Image (cartoon, helix red, strand yellow):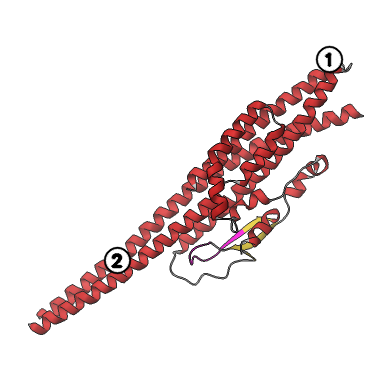
Amino acid sequence: MMHYLKAAASSLFAIILLSSCSGTNTTEETSQISTMDSTSKALRVQSDKLEEQTKKVEASLDKMEQEFESNNK
Amino acid sequence: MKKQLTYLGFSTLMLTLFVFTQASAQNDKGKGKKEHQKESHSRDKPGKGQQDNSAAGKDKNNHLQGNENKDNNANSKDVKDKKEDHKSRDWSEAGDRDGYKWDQKTFKDRNKIKNKEKVTLCHKPKGNNEPGVTLKVSSHALQAHLNHGDVRGECPPNNTTRYSESFLGKRTAYYTEVQSNQEQVAYSKSVLEYALERLSASRQQLTVMQRSNTPVQAIEQKKATVVELEQNVSLLETLIGVAVNVAVNKLK
């Protein structure tokens, strides 16, 4: 009886340890995913701002070009 | 009783070994991922762009040059470190190597040039056994990727169970975002560089106009255009600096 009890206790211990290990894995991945998400968001915001301002500069350059061409006609 | 104790001792020993093995594997995995992220992030740090800015800034007024120098000084150490550490494998600088160089003719066709078709490639993370990441990059950035070992086409299917599907999916999205950001920064820098050249030329034209008998209205119009461009250029430069800093800080 004692033999079976100890075997069962050992198995239980192993199961607990295994689940804790896989839990660590999940937690680690979750943490990394969270970091990647926040980084991606920050980069996206900056890219959008940059794109918008670049378009403004392009528009100014186009305007300047048009004026230049019309002055040279 | 003695037999039972022996059995218990043996079980405990086996369990300890098992736990130790698992813990080592976890540790290695975590370390590998961290190293990979660190490497990727370091590679994402802008460097060449700073130099590009510096080159572009030659034609700019003192105010703009001041900002630029500040950025250069702040990041010069990063540039040095990066050059040493990632000489041959700086994929995320691909954007900076896009080779956009504008003149009056090409700038008119910039949309065609910029929107060249994207190329699919398999990006190989450095430093660990992580599976490759399939990315679509600007054709302008392709060569830089190929130079450090990436290959054309999609990555082979991932058979490892080391990483969860969700993690790999997020990782792909993350790399795609980083790549997209780098390409935008590179394009914006190229436009900034061209705008600075045009600004310099326009200032000279304005001086000539003021010295000659050009009508005041024409001079005022030219002045207004130059001022507008100056303001937009100044803001663009600031935003490039901010984008670069965000990349540096977030990708640490």
Q: Quadrant of residue B70?
A: top right
Marks 2 and 1 in Cβ contact (< 8 Å)? no
Kindly identify the amino acid type of the residue bearing the numbered disc 1: Val
Which residue is labeled 1 in the image? B216
Disc number for residue A5: none
Residue sitting nearer the eye, A40 or B207: B207
Badge 2 sits on which subunit?
A
On whether residue B12 falls in the magenta region, the answer is: no
Q: Is residue B177 visible?
A: no
Q: Position of residue B96 (x, y in %)?
A: 65, 48
- In the rendered structure, which segment of residues is drawn in magenta? B126-135
Relative placement, left or right, of A65 versus B33 is: right
Could you tell me which residue is drawn at 88 percent across and 26 percent down?
A71
Relative placement, left or right, of A5 versus B211 is: left
Relative placement, left or right, of B27 versus B155 is: left
- The residue mark sitting in front, 2 or 1, is 1
**What SS does tag 1 mark?**
helix
Which residue is labeled 2 in the image? A19
Q: Residues within 10 Å of mark 2 (few under 14, many from 20)?
A: few
Q: Quadrant of the N terminus of chain B?
A: bottom left
Kindly identify the amino acid type of the residue bearing the numbered disc 2: Ser
Q: Position of residue B147 (x, y in %)?
A: 65, 61
Could you tell me which residue is drawn at 56 percent across and 55 percent down?
B86
Residue sitting nearer the eye, B81 or A65: B81
**What SS does tag 2 mark?**
helix
Up-down: is B56 above or below B81? above
Up-down: is B35 above or below A47? below
Q: Position of residue B228 (x, y in %)?
A: 71, 26
Badge 1 sits on which subunit?
B
Residue sitting nearer the eye, B52 or B226: B52
Magenta stretch, overall SS: loop
The CA distance from mark 2 to mark 1 is: 81 Å
